[in-house]
Image (tube, rainbow, N blue to C red):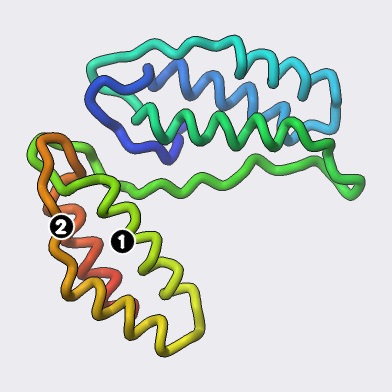
Amino acid sequence: MALPFVVALRGYDMRQVESLFAEVDEAVAADSAVLRAAARDTLRATTLRRRLRGYAPRDVDAAIAQRLAALAQPGTPSGPTRPPAITPLPFVVALGGYDMRQVESLFAEVDEAVAADSAVLRAAARDTLRTATLRRRLRGYACRAVDDAVAERLRAL
């Protein structure tokens, strides 16, 4: 099972994360209070191992928080609750890449404008993309992938 997490240096063990989320997502979708409680306890008790190459800890930690919030809510009467959607940016973390926080905030703003029906928001997002100067960091998102995504977003706007 491939989870939509960024692969990073010194990330969480991918197999351990995948097996943990398979178990938890099954419990989130179940209508059983016992399974949900067990999954909550599993999430809280699990200590994820770090590997040289693994899932970005920030993304995994955010997904764990989302799952805990979903498990705290009872299933809806019309059916089981679905796991929360996770849509991190699909960029590889590399040495000498763009500042991750700056890229994430830029794409959050642009994606919001792409989803909106407002021509004014779309024009502002297009101008923001064209004038954005992304800082480079020792560890950041791969430049070529970010540049390609910027060009793709410009075409979408």
Q: Quadrant of the C terminus?
A: bottom left
How far is mark 1 from mark 2, CA to CA? Answer: 9 Å
Q: Residue at x 33, y 81 (%)?
A: 124
Image quadrant in which you'd find residue 23: top right
Q: Which quadrant would residue 53 be assigned to in this image?
A: top left
> Residue extending furthest bottom?
119
**Amino acid type at mark 1:** Leu
* Secondary element at tag 1: helix
Would residue 43 appear left or right of 116 to someone viewing this image?
A: right
**Callout 2 crowding tier (Cα within 10 Å): few <14, some 14–19, many ≥20:** some
Above or below: residue 60 compared with residue 39: below
- In the image, what residue type sits under mark 2? Leu
Q: Which of 3 and 100 is in front in this view?
A: 100
What secondary structure is marked by label 2?
Answer: loop
- The residue under the point 24% across, 80% down is 127
Badge 1 or badge 2: first in the primary sequence: 1
Q: Which mark is residue 134?
A: 2
- In the image, is residue 88 above or below residue 114? above
Residue under the point 29% across and 14% down: 51
Relative image position of residue 86 (x, y in whole percent): 51, 45
The tally of labels here is 2
Where is residue 63? Give x, y as percent. 52, 35
Which residue is drawn at the image coordinates 50% and 84% (left, top)? 117
Crowding near the residue tagged with mark 1, few <14, some 14–19, many ≥20 C-alpha atoms within 10 Å? some
Check the image and report above or below for 24 versus 84: above
Q: Do the residues labelled 1 and 2 touch (CB within 8 Å)?
A: yes
Q: Which mark is residue 47?
A: none
Give the numbered dot on residue 106: 1
